[in-house]
Amino acid sequence: MNNPSKPHRGTIFLEDAEVVAQTAFDANQFVLKLKAPKCAATAQPGSFVHLTCDESLPMRRPLSIMRVDAQRGTVEVLYKIVGHGLHLLSAKKAGDRISTLGPIGNSFVPHPGRPRTLLVGGGVGIPPMVFLAEALRERSDADWKPLVLMGSEVPFPFRSRPSTILVPGMPEGAIACMPLLDEWGVPSRLASLAGYPGCFDGYVTDLAAAWLGSLDRAALAQVEIFACGPTVMLTAAAAVAKRFDIPCQVSLEEFMACAVGGCAGCAVKVATPNGPAMKRVCVDGPVFDAAAVFNA
């Protein structure tokens, strides 16, 4: 029987997942697809998996989930090689087995009263935005109109192209998109300081501010921001949300040891109704209200 004071008990599964495919992209980026049926059945946008990169390494690595296929029982993650563990993970081939713990953490909570969702992803913060966009596309409880903005200073982990979807209020020349999202009918735009063709020349949060600045008061009242990426990007996203008086949820990136709430090594200070408190990013998050984190 689950303990109501420990809502995550019974919802995180340990699976001996099979590697279905691993695709390499520029800048040491990889998309890993795993057969992990229990995780795929319950994962939500914002949750993550904790993977054993290799039998020689006792410490797992937390990776955000980018897509799931509950019918086929598959989970996809995007990662960039940083350190020895992920280098070993990148060597895994189809048919290999990987110990997978997940899904872990809470999820983004879009509110039907604000259907113009602005999804902002930076670098390895892109995966949850893809997951959330796909989930919103499948929901029918509101007239969801997601807009996905992605930023990267290294080549994007997909071959970008000009979007076929018009987005009023976008700065001139910002036309590059993620093709998968375009195929779904979800508008997306890319930002980079690296001079990639069709990308907005600046930070992704500056692109978000430019688009928000084109909206009138009534339109802004329908917007909610969801963001994932490096802390400096999330700080900027929280500032943009405050400037336009828009609610914002952020998915934090922190180093983790156990990822199930036992070690508290990933704790951050969060504002609560009872004052500041230390919350664990793994199981109390990774999704938090932006104002609670960056104004705590």
Image: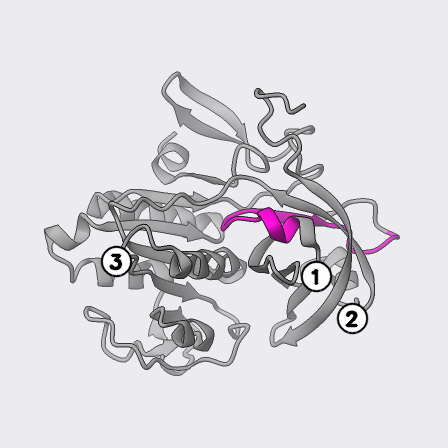
Q: Secondary structure at mark 2?
A: loop
Placement of 279 over or under 25, stated as above or below = above
Please state if 113 lies on the left or on the right of 163 as rendered. left
Please state if 292 lies on the left or on the right of 67 as rendered. left
Marked residue nearer the N-terminal end (2 or 3): 2
Q: Dot 1 corresponds to which residue?
A: 34
Q: Dot 2 corresponds to which residue?
A: 94
Instruction: Find residue 22 and report its image quarter.
Output: bottom right
Q: Amino acid at mark 2?
A: Ala
Asked if labels 1 and 2 touch by Cβ distance under 8 angstroms, the answer is no
Q: CA distance from mark 2 to mark 3?
A: 42 Å
Q: CA distance from mark 2 to mark 1?
A: 9 Å
Marked residue nearer the N-terminal end (2 or 1): 1
Between circles 3 and 1, the one closer to the viewer is 1
Label 2: how many Cα within 10 Å (few below 14, some 14–19, many 20+): few
What x and y, as percent, mark residue 267? Answer: 57, 31
On the question of residue 23 being in view, the answer is yes
Q: Secondary structure at mark 1?
A: strand
Placement of 235 over or under 214, stated as above or below = above
Label 1: how many Cα within 10 Å (few below 14, some 14–19, many 20+): many
Q: Dot 3 corresponds to which residue?
A: 209
> Is 148 or 145 nearer to us in this picture?
145
Q: Amino acid at mark 1?
A: Leu
What x and y, as percent, mark residue 219? Answer: 16, 55
